[in-house]
Amino acid sequence: MTRKEFMKELEFLLQDISDEEREEALAFYENYFDEAGSMNESQVIEELDSPARVAAIIKDGLKGHFDEHIYAGNEGFSNDQYTQNYEVIDVDDKKAKKSKKEKKQESQMHNRWNEMDSRDRLILIVLALLACVPFSFSIFHVIGGIFGGLFGVGFSIITLFFCLIFGFWIITFIFYIASVVMIVVGIANIFVLPGAGFICIGIGFVLMALGSIFGKVAAWFFKDCIPTIINAIADGLGKIFHPRGV
Amino acid sequence: MIFNTGAALLDAIVLSVVSRDKEGTYGYKITQDVQAVISVSESTLYPVLRRLLKDGCLESYDKEFQGRNRRYYKITNTGIVQLNMYKREWYEYTLKINKLFDGGYQND
């Protein structure tokens, strides 16, 4: 990592503090590099450890509790919190840590809800509720053949999407009911009119099969489509509110 | 050998180092001077300086040095009072502890 990269990363990580504090801190470290001289650049970077560690200390300093856990002794000052979190013992450990980090990122993909803080959760819930508002009105729209109209094209798309999902469940349900009715009617008639009875039972099984197909499609929507979409939304939110996992 | 010291001792050390230069001193030199005596992480000193500035114990000014700005830190009167208080506290505290350790101190 070069000085330029280090400072750029630090600036990035300090986005969420006030302009004044950020400029002050960046000026301090620019100054620090200047004074140390370009000969010592890599040494300074090594001593500062990582932009993440420096940024964490600056931010904790603003909150007024960065040195709550500082200990003094013959060895000098140390802060176990930052040591545990940021210091790396050797190269192997570093690699292990890195792959662990990557793994963690992977698992985050599937566990966004748990990773979110309460503010993000609230925003997501509000968004989900907003998306549901048109749905409650729109069943009638779709049934009555009035698409869009009052809620505009955007709402219609959401509406259509929800109706598709729930429509599949409804169709599945209707098919099953119809198939049961046909089978019952068929059995009832089997002794009086054997031919018609068997046809009825046959139609009942066909309907049941169709119902199963729609049921599978609906289940696919719920199991795969919706989580993917929610993840995509959560991903977007995460990027807005927590740039690069700060 | 580790004691939880909190913020005050770091403040006292930085104030003491800055007070040695009447014209003020700059961030890198403060770090070097502190590290010459006791090991402390570079990144730890920035929040200390920032806090001392906000509390009015230090003041900063920019001065040109070799074609660029160098930020100097200088102790204020408030800072001098604060430093003297820290020093007095430290002497009394360590005196008591030393006496206790050496076995001579008894609270009659």
Image (tube, helix red, strand yellow):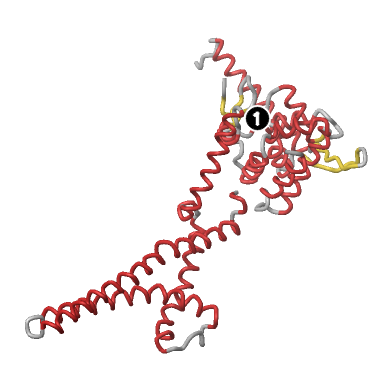
Q: Residue furthest front?
A: A195
SS for callout 1: helix
x, y percent for residue B84: 72, 29
Amino acid on which the number 1 mark rests in the picture: Leu
Q: Say which residue appears at 66% left-offset and 22% top-offset.
A: B91
Front residue of A169/B82: it is A169
| The one of A237 and A102 positioned closer to us in this rendering | A102
How many numbered marks are there? 1
- A170 is higher (above) or lower (below) than A122: below
Give the percent coordinates (x, y) of residue A52. Answer: 64, 42
Q: Chain of mark 1?
A: B
* Residue B75 in the image, given as x and y percentages of width and height: 79, 36
Q: Residue A135, percent across and down?
A: 43, 77
The quarter of the picture where residue A81 lies is: top right
- B42, above or below A19, in the image: above
Q: Could you tell me which residue is drawn at 69 percent across and 23 percent down? A: B38
Give the left or right position of residue B26, taking residue A120 as reference: right
B72 relative to A92 in the view: left or right: right
Image height check: is A14 above or below A183? Answer: above
Rendered view: B18 above or below A241: above
Residue at 55% from the left image edge and 13% from the top image edge: B101
Q: Residue furthest left?
A: A191
Other residues around mark 1 within 10 Å, as few (<14) / some (14–19) / many (≥20): some
Q: Could you tell me which quadrant the N terminus of chain A lies in? A: top right
In the picture provided, is A179 more to the left or to the right than B64? left
Residue extending furthest toward the right = B67
Instruction: Name the residue carrying label 1.
Output: B9
Q: In the image shown, does A245 or A78 lie closer to the viewer?
A: A245
